[in-house]
Image: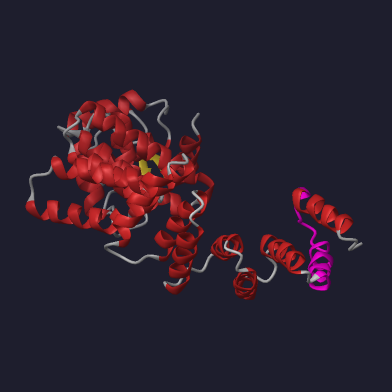
Amino acid sequence: MKKIDQYFLDFTDKLAYIDLKKDSSYELLNKTPLALYTDDMSENIISGDFENRIKLNIILDGLIINLAIDPDFKYKQSYIKILENYLEKIGAYTAQRALKIGNKKPEKALLLLRGGYIINPFDKYNAYNYARALWPKAYEDTKYKDEFIKEALRILQEIILQDEDFPLSYYELGNIYQNLGEYIKARSYYENALRRTEDLDAKDEIRSKISTIFDNAEIEEALYYIGKGNYEKAMGILTRLLSKTKRADAYYYLGVCYQNIGQYENSSLAFENSLDKGGEFRQLYNDYSISLYALDKKIEAIEIINSGLKKYPEDPRMIYNRIQINIDLGNLKKAKEDIDNLETYDDLSDELSRNLQIIKDQFNLN
């Protein structure tokens, strides 16, 4: 059993069962125990005689939801036979019912969509709506977060394998990857959806989505090339982005590129611009100080570290870098104070601990 199946199996207590009388209005239904969704029962779904006047759609919903909760239910084939007798297209029914009640009864809507998917996974529109309702659950129930997202991705990608021109799947895949922060993938899926969409309003909505994430996708692509050591390519992307919008993170990564190719003047300028644009991450202060130190601007490097330590007062890497610069400046007393401070940290890495001992031994700071 997949973990996601266990999630739905936990809804078993939402089911109750009835047997209709032999003379009930629905002849096909009086041969099998029928599942009812208990929330429906509690809403006065019955008027008069319980067994003879229960609404047919409530019975059909109950059968579908039962299969959503337990796909291996012993009366599965009987339930499907009943559903096929009363419904021309089960997937169309579940999608329509779910969309109608989705805002007021999201739990029931999800169960109906899953039931429709289990009965007929090849109904593209119902499958799409099931995936669309499923993945946002990842942000409500952390226990099953990965399963919700993986299942939604699998379903949407299966739809594309069935029909590569079904735009809604591409669009929803774009939404998922946007929420995951994978902007290159999101942009690609949105662009695929745009190419396959005819409706003008839908096209405008997709273009708006692409515009919203475009800059983030550029940053992600630049990071990819930085990770590969292709700094020239990353610099081209970041420079193009900065010609349109002055982002602190774009300036920072541009500084990283310049620093890695030894252009410390340019990296310092980029890091300074990042700070001016509101850059507030600790690695910015560290890298900026390293570029300044490489330019023999040691006092300025310490000033940047001190600014960083005001925001991140217990950052061991910044303190360690200040130790090295103070030793270079001959400020052994200040270096000793920082060493003694760092050695009180319980979570100091083995690397920093070894380096501190080497410094202490070399400069008699024990």
Residue 166, x across and y down, in percent: 18, 36
Furthest residue toward top: 77
- Tell me the quadrant of the picture where the C terminus can be found: bottom right
Q: Nearer the viewer, residue 74 or 183?
A: 183
**Residue in the image at 45% along x and 72% along y:** 278
**Residue in the image at 33% along x and 51% along y:** 237
- The answer to whether residue 323 of the structure is visible from this angle is yes
Q: Is residue 128 left or right of residue 220?
A: left
- The answer to whether residue 38 of the structure is visible from this angle is no
> In the rendered structure, does residue 89 fall within the stretch colored magenta?
no
Q: Nearer the viewer, residue 209 or 43?
A: 209
Q: Nearer the viewer, residue 257 or 8?
A: 257
Residue 24, x across and y down, in percent: 24, 37
Furthest residue toward front: 296
Q: Main secondary structure of the magenta part?
A: helix
Q: Which residues are magenta?
A: 332-350
Residue 358, x across and y down, in percent: 84, 52
Looking at the image, residue 114 lies above or below residue 333: above
> In the rendered structure, does residue 343 fall within the stretch colored magenta?
yes
